[in-house]
Image (spheres, rainbow, N blue to C red):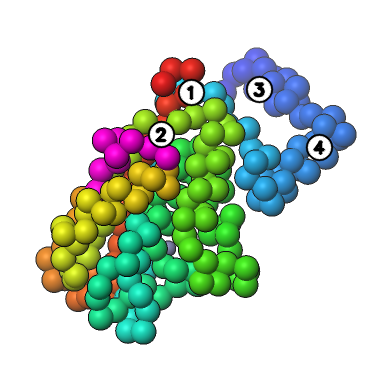
Amino acid sequence: MALQSIRARGAFSSSRVAPQPLRAARAVRAVRVVASAAAVTAPSLPYRVGHGFDLHRLAEGYKLIIGGIDIPHTKGCEAHSDGDVLLHTVTDAILGALSLPDIGQLFPDTDPKWKGARSDIFLKEAVRLMGDKGYVLGNLDCTIIAQKPKLSPHKENIRSNLSAILNADPSVVNIKAKTHEKVDSIGEERSIACHAVVMLIRKDLA
Ligand SMILES: [Zn+2]
């Protein structure tokens, strides 16, 4: 590397070292990011895309709740909260789109406050943060993966309830359901999983 370019790099990096008071202020801000999602300032992009994924073990003795709807089944999701795999996934997709900490950081399962909690609390908080950051829901596409029970009879109910929690028109909320071809833990009915992709639109463009 030419000496000139090394000098140029050195000058560039030293010019990027902030004064100590500024560094301290940045450190405090970094801590607040974890403590409070509201401390994060997301760049004001016109559109933001987020992905969410969640998986729960299925076990007897638990209710199966998907999208806030009780689904009759012999097993339910093992979880600290109500184990709603869809609402957890959508919460993480929205938080991800906003570059905020994930659901596990905002609502740690070590906190007794969230034991048995209804998962719409988590999603409503994500929706509140979305509004705070100046975005509205563009559209949401979800895929629930379960070998059993058959979810197609419940899809419309799930979509309607999820749309209400999101305060969104059902036409921008899509729910797909598929099996796992009887392979791996999902296919062997030992777990259930969900993926979601969300697009947020800056309010002034919606
Ligand atoms: Zn979960």
Look at 52% across and 37% down and name the residue there: 130
Residue 95 image offset from top left, x and y in percent = 50, 44
Sequence-first tag of 4 and 1: 4
Percent position of residue 22, x then y = 82, 32
Mark pair 1, 3: CA separation: 40 Å
Q: Which residue is mark 4?
A: 25
Give the residue type that dot 3 points to: Arg
User: Above or below — where is 174 with respect to 150?
Assistant: above
Q: Is residue 88 visible?
A: yes
Q: CA distance from mark 4 to mark 2?
A: 33 Å
Instruction: Compare marks 4 and 3 and give the one earlier in the sequence.
Output: 3
* Residue 168 on the magenta span: yes
Kindly indicate whether the residue at mark 2 contacts the one at mark 1 (C-beta within 8 angstroms).
no
Q: Which residue is mark 2?
A: 137
Q: Quadrant of the C terminus?
A: top left
SS assignment at label 2: strand
Q: Is residue 103 visible?
A: no
Residue holding disc 3: 9
**Alpha carbon separation for disc pair 2 and 3:** 42 Å
Q: Please identify, in this view, whether the residue under mark 2 or under mark 3 is nearer the observer.
A: 2
Badge nearest the viewer, 4 or 2 = 2
**Upstream in the sequence, badge 1 or badge 2?**
2
Q: CA distance from mark 1 to mark 2?
A: 9 Å
Q: State the extent of the magenta-drawn residues as a range.
A: 167-175
SS assignment at label 1: helix
As helix, strand or loop, the secondary structure at mark 4 comes to helix
Spatial distance from mark 4 to mark 3, Cα to Cα?
26 Å
Residue 203's tag is: 1
- Image-based side of 64 in relation to 121, left or right: left
